[in-house]
Image: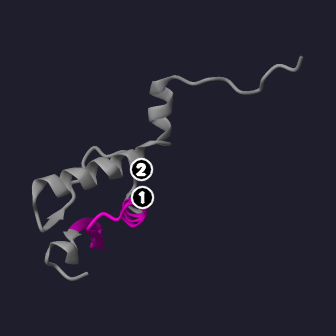
Amino acid sequence: MMSSRFVPITEKELAGLGLRSAHGTSEALLSEFLEAGLEVAKLDRTGLPSSLPSLQASLRSLIQSRGFPVKVMVRKGEIYLVKTEQSGIPS
């Protein structure tokens, strides 16, 4: 029998790779934004494990696939979330 070339990794190692971070982070951020009841908000990325492009892409993908009433804007290196038409602001 051939031995496996794959070695399991720990949760700590997985967190360090950032493989789950962008999508999981994005979902939590979108939920937090919607629950806050804000129309527009700038995202404080302090401590977030994802890069700006990765987080932006993940947010947009999640918004599109799940139909969140939110638009993502990036201006001067900052991410802004805006509630869309469904809440009174046209997209």
Which region is colored magenta?
A: 56-81
- Please tell me whether mark 1 sits on a helix, a strand or a loop: helix
Seen as rendered, the residue at the extreme top is 1
* Residue count near mark 1 (Cα–Cα under 10 Å), binned few <14, some 14–19, many ≥20: many
Q: Which mark is residue 44?
A: none
Assess whether residue 45 is covered by the magenta stretch. no
Q: Quadrant of residue 1?
A: top right
Q: Locate residue 7 relative to residue 51 in the image: left or right.
A: right
The answer to whether residue 45 shows anywhere in this view is no
Q: Which mark is residue 58?
A: 1
Looking at the image, which is closer to me, 86 or 52? 86
Q: Earlier in the sequence, mark 1 or mark 2?
A: 2
- Please tell me whether mark 2 sits on a helix, a strand or a loop: helix
Q: Quadrant of residue 65?
A: bottom left
Three-letter residue code for mark 1 = Ser
Decide: marks 1, 2 in contact (CB < 8 A)? yes
The answer to whether residue 74 is above or below residue 48 is below
